[in-house]
Amino acid sequence: MPSRAISSLQPLACNLSSSLAALQISASVKAASRLPAERCAGSLLSLRPSQNLNKRPLQIASLHTSSPLNAERKRKPPSNPWAVAKAAEKREKVRARKEELRQLRQDAASDPVVGHTTPFLEAMDSKPEMLPPIDHLVPATDAHERQEAFEKVVIGERLGRLNHYLQPEEVKMSLARSKALEDPPLHAVTEKSVLQGKEMHLKATAVMNRILSLSNGSSKDKTRANKTWCVETFGRHTTDEKFPQPKHPSIASNPEADPAKTPRIGRDTGSSEVQAALLTMKIRTLAKQLETNTHDKMNKRNLRVMVHKRQKLLKYLKRKERGGQRYQYVMESLGLDDAAIMKEVFI
C-alpha cells in the first residue's frame, strides 16, 4: 500500500516541479525587461535568475576626466607661515586699493540730476545781496563829509546782474549822461552848488542801484534774469567767437568753394546748449523744492521728464560737435560728466 501511494504521487510531483520552473522563467523575463540591456543579458542566458540581482548597485559613468582618487583628494594646508602671512598682506593691499579707487570714482562722479557745483551754477543759485538804506550809511554832517560818504557807498557797491532787462554798462552810461545834464551853468557856478550837485548825483546813483537790484525783485524777476544770463552765456552769437566751427577738409583746401554764411540776426535761443542750460535751471529749482515736498509725485515725474530731455539734447550736442570744445565747455559749466549723459539715469 505505501509503495503504490508513492508511485501515484510521483507524476504529481513532476508536474509541480515543471510548473514552478515555468513560473521562475516568466519572473526572470519580466525582471529582465525592466533592467538595462547590459544587465539583463546574463540573466537571459540562464533559466534561473541571479540571487544577488537586486543587491548590486547601478554602475553610473563618471564625469571626471581625472581619476576619482585625484578628485577626492583634499588640498594640504601650506606649511610655510611666512608665505601665508605674505599672501594675506597682499590681499589686504589689493582690497584697500580697490576701496580707495572706488571712493575716488564716487567722489569724482557728478550727480546726474543737479550736477556738481561750478561757478556758473553758484552764481545762478545765489541770492542777490540786499543793499542797505542810504540814510543809515551817510551821516548828517557837513557837505564835504556827506560827499565822501556817498562816494564810498557808491564805489563799494557791485551791481552784478540787474533787473528790468538792463546791463550795468547801460546804467553807467545813463548816469553819466544825467550828470552832464544836471551841471549848473557856468555863470551861476558856486562852491556850494557844485557840492550839492555832486551829492545829488551820488545819491541818485545809489537810489538807482537799489531800484535795479535783483534783491528787491520777485522770484519771477530772478527767473527771467537767469534765463537771459543762460542765453548770453551759451548762445552761439557769443560762443562762435570762442569756438569757431572747423571747416570741412575739402572746403579748407579750396576756400573759394566755401559759400558765404548767412549772418545771424538777434540772439541764439534755440541751440542745444542754451536749451540744456535752461532745463538745468528748472531742474535745480524743482529738485530743491522736492527735498521738502517728498510726496509731490507729479513734480517728481516732471523732474524725471526734464532730466531725460536734457540728456537727449546733450547727446545730440556731443554727436554733432564730436565731443569738441563747445561740448566740453557746456558740460563743465553745467557740472555734468559723460556718465550722466550716456548712461541710464534713475530718479
Image (cartoon, grey):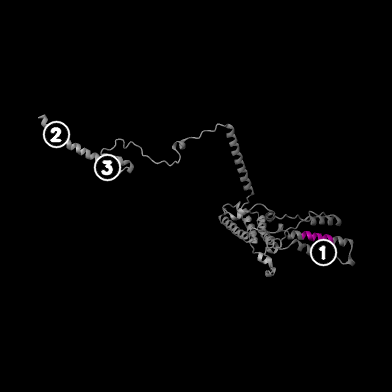
Give the residues drawn in magenta, as a range.
197-207
Please name the amino acid that badge 1 sits on: Lys
- Which SS class for mark 3? helix
84 part of magenta stretch: no
The residue carrying mark 3 is 29
Residue 179: which numbered mark, if any? 1
The residue shown at (13%, 31%) is 6
**204 in the magenta segment:** yes
Whether residue 37 is visible, yes or no, is yes
- Name the element at disc 1: helix
Circles 1 and 2 in contact, beta carbons < 8 Å:
no
Q: Residue furthest front?
A: 45
Lower sequence index among marks 1 and 2: 2
Indicate which disc, 3 or 2, sits on the residue closer to the N terminus. Answer: 2
- Provide residue 195's location: percent of width, then percent of height: 86, 60
Q: Nearer the viewer, residue 261 or 257?
A: 257
Q: CA distance from mark 3 to mark 1?
A: 127 Å
